[in-house]
Image (tube, rainbow, N blue to C red):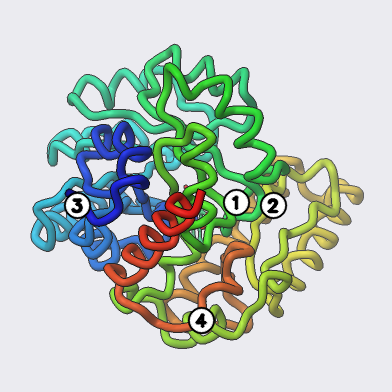
Amino acid sequence: MTAYPKTQALMSRGCDFLGTEYAILCGAMSWVSERHLVSAISNAGGFGVIACGAMTPELLDREIAGTKELTQKPFGVNLITMHPQLFELIEVCGKHRVGHVVLAGGIPPKGSVEGIKGHGAKVVVFAPTLALAKKLLRSGGDALVIEGMEAGGHIGPVATSVLAQEFLPALKEEHLVFVAGGIGRGEAIAGYLEMGAVGAQLGTRFACASESIAHPNFKKAFFRANARDAVASVQLDPRLPVIPVRALKNKGTEEFTAKQREVGLLLDQGSVDMGEAQLRIEHFWAGALRRAVIDGDVENGSLMAGQSVGMVTKEEPVAEIIAALMRESEDALSRR
Ligand SMILES: Cc1cc2nc3c(=O)[nH]c(=O)nc-3n(C[C@H](O)[C@H](O)[C@H](O)COP(=O)(O)O)c2cc1C
């Protein structure tokens, strides 16, 4: 007899896939999802995912080794597809026998899915459209995360509720789909499980857990914020490939708008080419998240956060957050 029988019955395919007690993933968050938070999530029965971000293969090697020292439970690694050393990073995951690799940030380059599977690991993919999801699942993806625009960090244009209605009926019989974006309570997890999801991924709700190494200033900004404070960045110039980022409004978000204007002007004048312009935009954000998460500069750094930030009101241990989510889901399903 489990503590949450109705929820765990609906999560069973997700739990089998992840090798966990609960099919609750803590989505990778650059700088936040390091060994302490990842191991805490896995030790509490969920599934932690290391955010590789811009780490070198050596740094990732150390982070995986450090995580293994803190947990015996399964955890995954999130790799960004445009990382210039993607294939070396895949080898590092293979060396450590990481069981699940999440490929984020774009269409996986040729050979990457095969490389991961060659090490016996499972591949988790993201897809912005149903057609692409089907293609990725046909060509080696073992599970899919659909992530709506309510989420923190880099986002697409469609809401989680709409993605769920479009993707779940089409994929639920044959594939494993996890839902992410805007989930702050267990009632929402129950709803998506009933629609055919096998589990949920949350980021914002876990970012300020007691085990998270995020700076106290970063956590305080989350506790104070309401849903409406977590805004998506605006693309000012259609020529510049700015993927929207959802973050708490601050001086940093305003400066980003000004930076786009400045780079757009340089493009008009012909003083930079498109490659250089794109690089300047990317450099602007490079390090911004680190400034907020690690240094605690909540004025100029990037406070990436989803709309569920309004439900993050205090520092709590990961195990309590997971227990609350499971209890809320179970209560909701029991009332049906
Ligand atoms: C501070 C922060 C950093 C993030 N960094 C990454 C990242 O490096 N890679 C990634 O795939 N997703 C990243 N995400 C997205 C999360 O993995 C997760 O999918 C998302 O937070 C789920 O939505 P929620 O914030 O509404 O719970 C980040 C989210 C936050 C809040």
> Which of the marked residues, 4 or 1, is nearer the chain's N terminus?
1
Label 3 crowd (10 A; few <14 / some 14-19 / many >=20): many
- Res 30 visible: yes
Q: Mark 4: which amino acid?
A: Thr
Instruction: Give the residue type at disc 2.
Output: Pro
Ranked by sequence position, the earlier of labels 2 and 1 is: 1
* Figure label count: 4
Q: Are marks 3 and 1 in contact (CB under 8 Å)?
A: no
Question: Is 75 situated above or below 162?
Answer: below
Image quadrant of residue 259?
bottom right
Farthest residue in the front direction?
335
In this figure, which residue is indicated by the disc labeled 1?
154
Residue visible at 46% across and 70% down?
A: 290
- Name the side, left or right, on which 134 lies relative to 95: right
In the image, is the residue at mark 1 within 8 Å of ligand 1 by its beta carbon?
A: yes
Residue 45 at x, y = what percent? 23, 55
Report whether the residue tagged 3 is closer than 8 Å to ligand 1.
Answer: no
Residue 204 appears at what percent x and percent y?
Answer: 50, 64
Tag shown at residue 313: 4
**In front: mark 4 or mark 2?**
4
Q: Earlier in the sequence, mark 4 or mark 2?
A: 2
Q: Neighbour class for label 2 at 10 Å: few (<14), some, many (≥20)?
A: some
Q: Position of residue 142 (x, y in %)?
A: 36, 24
Q: Which residue is mark 2?
A: 244
Q: Nearer the viewer, mark 4 or mark 3?
A: 4
In the rendered structure, the answer to whether residue 58 lies left or right of residue 51 reads: left
For marks 2 and 1, give the CA distance.
Answer: 6 Å
Q: Identity of the amino acid at label 1?
A: His
Callout 4 secondary element:
loop
For the residues labelled 2 and 1, say whether their Cβ atoms are less than 8 Å apart: yes
Tell me the CA gap for discs 4 and 2.
25 Å
